[in-house]
Image (tube, helix red, strand yellow):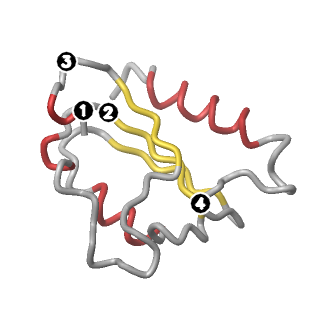
């Protein structure tokens, strides 16, 4: 919300498990500020996140005027880290964000 209100504040955003809406309340979207966001943003989102499905996130990201990317995490919920991915997930996220944030073509 702050980056939407103050576009020059940051160059890039990395959002981990953005709470799109409260669980079981998809009608209470937390996206009112998305159309004002001009900062490139990468979202890392669990495929089983109760705060928003992958499809809901894809639709919500279309509201953002800046370049966005989503890194879905298979088998993960809102916590992102699971027993199966805890060793490799931090590296995957860091590499994906570095590629996203410093892509000179975008």
On the image, the x and y values in percent for residue 90 come to 72, 36
- Would you name the residue on which mark 3 appears? 8
Q: Residue at x 46, y 46 (%)?
A: 43
The answer to which of marks 1 and 4 sits earlier in the sequence is 1
Q: Measure how far apart labels 1 and 2 are at the Cα level.
A: 14 Å
Q: Quadrant of residue 94?
A: top right
As displayed, is residue 51 above or below residue 4? below
Q: Which mark is residue 2?
A: 1
Camera-nearest label, 2 or 3: 3
Q: Measure how far apart labels 2 and 3 are at the Cα level.
A: 12 Å
- Would you name the residue on which mark 4 appears? 78
Q: Is residue 89 left or right of residue 3?
A: right
Q: Measure how far apart labels 3 and 4 are at the Cα level.
A: 29 Å
Foreground pick, 61 / 29: 29
Camera-nearest label, 1 or 2: 1
Q: Residue at x 57, y 57 (%)?
A: 72
The answer to which of marks 4 and 2 sits earlier in the sequence is 2
Crowdedness near tag 2: few (<14), some (14–19) or many (≥20) residues, C-alpha within 10 Å: some
* Count of picture labels: 4
Q: Residue at x 59, y 60 (%)?
A: 78
Q: Give the secondary structure at mark 1.
A: helix
User: Which quarter of the rendered picture does the N terminus lie within?
Assistant: top left
Q: Give the secondary structure at mark 3.
A: loop
Camera-nearest label, 4 or 2: 4
The answer to which of marks 3 and 4 sits earlier in the sequence is 3
Q: Residue furthest bottom?
A: 24
């Amino acid at each position: 919300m702050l980056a939407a209100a103050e576009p020059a504040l940051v160059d890039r955003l990395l959002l981990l498990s953005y709470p799109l809406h409260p669980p079981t309340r998809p009608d209470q979207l937390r996206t009112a500020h998305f159309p004002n966001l001009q900062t490139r943003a990468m979202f890392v989102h669990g495929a089983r996140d109760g705060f928003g499905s992958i499809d809901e996130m894809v639709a919500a990201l279309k509201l953002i005027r800046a370049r966005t990317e989503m890194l879905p995490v298979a088998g993960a919920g809102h916590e992102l880290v699971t027993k199966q991915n805890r060793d490799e997930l931090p590296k995957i996220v860091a590499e994906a964000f570095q590629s996203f944030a410093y892509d000179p073509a975008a």
